[in-house]
Image (cartoon, rainbow, N blue to C red):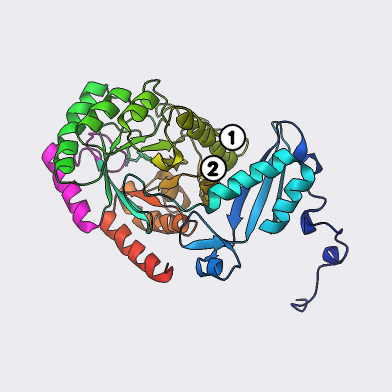
């Protein structure tokens, strides 16, 4: 092994430029249609910010001074480099004003402190407990179809530390058949009313605008839409009711999404798609503070797509919204392990969930609230504010 002080040869020959090691990086970055992305890496404790060594990540417990700079065009070209932020910003100005401004916008969104989401402070990771009032959900179908069972389950989740209850009446597992909105309402509204009357923060897990509207009227404070506001009436309903919204990415629809999902680059394609949805929301008067973005683990994604997206969790903070991750008990956990059935995927769910917390994710959507709350307590102890 060379001595630690040995300097790489390339460093001695680096050209004199404020962009340092990036001086010759990606000469085509200023061309029309090229996109740049910033993925914070090497996260440090937030105390590094007070010491002036780094900038804060989304107002949370981490700070960063280095990022992966990713540049790609509309075709197949993609370049990646790791560098200090100061070099990345200098490089941007050396390429073009448009590149520099795009980087500046992303850095602003990455570092901005986050307002509360649906009235809930984001000073600790939030736990969204899943209440599936369905006969056929992939991991607990039929367990809570009866409203009394769903209510008892939600009560137990609140007692165990859930910050939000996500109540859904349609399974979206791969191959699931759609449920008519009237049936969905029949399943979820009594449960939503019960928890709203208790003052709990309730989200409705639906892709149907009519269900969003009736759920909001019944006290749901958040709309969670796996179709990313695909129903043409969904965005108008969200804008009109003033409800905060979870915008999730899905490729295709549940019936066919796992047939042959393809991406140029999964993490970046999902980023672009979410960015477009956030822009559409802004145009309709729904500000980023009212939006949680979710890359949609398992929705039209193979195992390697899911892993690539999870590795890039910090990238999504550049959208300027809350970041929500739902990976609890999902199929890729079994595929990476020993093909355990869904109810035996808790350890993998916690391991991957903690990995996303280590990248600043603000909300975890989970089936196992008590166990996640214990993991969060440990995580909070290890990462003081
Ligand atoms: N995953 C499921 C359902 N809704 N919403 C968001 N925002 N993110 C997710 O990852 C997500 C979601 C699937 O999980 P589950 O509800 O347990 O299963 P099913 O759809 O079979 O009811």
Residue assigned mark 2: 305
Q: Quadrant of residue 247?
A: top left
Furthest residue in direction left, as rendered: 148
Q: Quadrant of residue 265?
A: top right
75 on left or right of 199: right
- Count of labels shown? 2
Q: Position of residue 47 (x, y in %)?
A: 51, 69
Q: x%, y% of residue 360?
A: 47, 56
Q: Provide residue 86's location: percent of width, then percent of height.
A: 70, 58
State the quadrant of the C terminus.
bottom left
Please name whichever residue, 159 or 286, is drawn nearer the observer in this view of the structure: 286
Query: Which residue is nearer to you in this view: 323 or 2?
Result: 323
Q: Are marks 2 and 1 in contact (CB under 8 Å)?
A: yes
Q: Quadrant of ligand 1?
A: top left
What percent of the width, then of the height, locates residue 82? Answer: 69, 56
Q: Residue at x 16, y 37 (%)?
A: 193
**Is 307 located above or below residue 194 in the figure?**
below
Residue position marked by numbered label 1 in the rendering: 263
Q: Earlier in the sequence, mark 2 or mark 1?
A: 1
Q: At 22% from the left edge and 34% from the top edge, which residue is drawn? A: 135
Front-most of residues 177 and 52: 52
In magenta segment, residue 143: yes
**Image position of 374 with respect to 185: above or below:** below
Q: Is residue 76 above or below residue 100?
A: above
Q: Secondary structure at mark 1?
A: loop
* Gap in angstroms between the C-alphas marked 2 and 1: 8 Å
Left or right of 193, for residue 323: right
Say few, some or many: other residues with alpha carbon within 10 Å of mark 2 (under 14 / 14 to 19 / 20 or more): many
Instruction: Please report the residue visible at 21 percent of the width from the left and 47 percent of the height from the top.
Output: 200
Highlighted range, magenta? 132-161
């Amino acid at each position: 092994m060379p001595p630690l002080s040995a300097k790489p040869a390339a460093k001695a020959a680096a050209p004199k430029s404020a962009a340092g090691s990036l001086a010759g990086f990606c000469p085509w970055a200023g061309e029309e249609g090229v996109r740049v992305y910033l993925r914070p890496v090497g996260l440090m404790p937030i105390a590094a910010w007070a010491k002036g060594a780094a900038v804060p990540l989304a107002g949370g417990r981490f700070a960063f001074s280095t990022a992966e700079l990713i540049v790609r065009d509309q075709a197949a070209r993609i370049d990646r480099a790791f560098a200090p932020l100061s070099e990345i910003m200098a490089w941007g100005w050396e390429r073009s004003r448009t590149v520099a401004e795009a980087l500046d916008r992303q850095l602003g969104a990455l570092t901005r402190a986050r307002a509360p989401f649906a009235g809930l402070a984001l000073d600790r990771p939030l736990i969204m407990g899943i209440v599936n009032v369905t006969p056929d959900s992939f991991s607990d179908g039929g367990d809570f179809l009866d409203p009394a069972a769903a209510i008892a389950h939600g009560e137990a989740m609140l007692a165990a530390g859930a910050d939000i209850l996500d109540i859904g009446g349609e399974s979206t597992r791969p191959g699931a058949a759609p449920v008519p909105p009237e049936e969905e309402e029949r399943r979820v509204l009594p449960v939503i009313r019960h928890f709203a009357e208790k003052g709990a923060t309730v989200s409705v897990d639906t892709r149907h605008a009519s269900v969003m509207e009736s759920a909001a009227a019944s006290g749901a404070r958040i709309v969670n839409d796996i179709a990313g506001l695909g129903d043409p009436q969904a965005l108008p309903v969200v804008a009109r009711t003033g409800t905060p919204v979870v915008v999730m990415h899905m490729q295709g629809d549940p019936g066919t999404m796992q047939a042959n999902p393809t991406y140029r680059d999964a993490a970046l394609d999902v980023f672009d798609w979410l960015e477009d949805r956030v822009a559409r929301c802004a145009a309709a008067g729904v500000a980023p503070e009212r939006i949680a973005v979710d890359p949609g683990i398992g929705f039209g994604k193979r195992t390697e797509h899911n892993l690539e997206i999870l590795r890039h969790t910090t990238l999504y903070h550049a959208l300027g919204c809350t970041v929500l991750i739902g990976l609890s008990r999902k199929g890729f956990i079994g595929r990476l392990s020993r093909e355990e059935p869904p109810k035996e995927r808790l350890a993998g769910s916690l391991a991957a969930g903690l990995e996303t917390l280590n990248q600043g994710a603000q909300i975890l959507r989970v089936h196992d609230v008590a166990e996640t709350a214990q993991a969060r307590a440990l995580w909070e102890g290890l990462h003081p504010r």
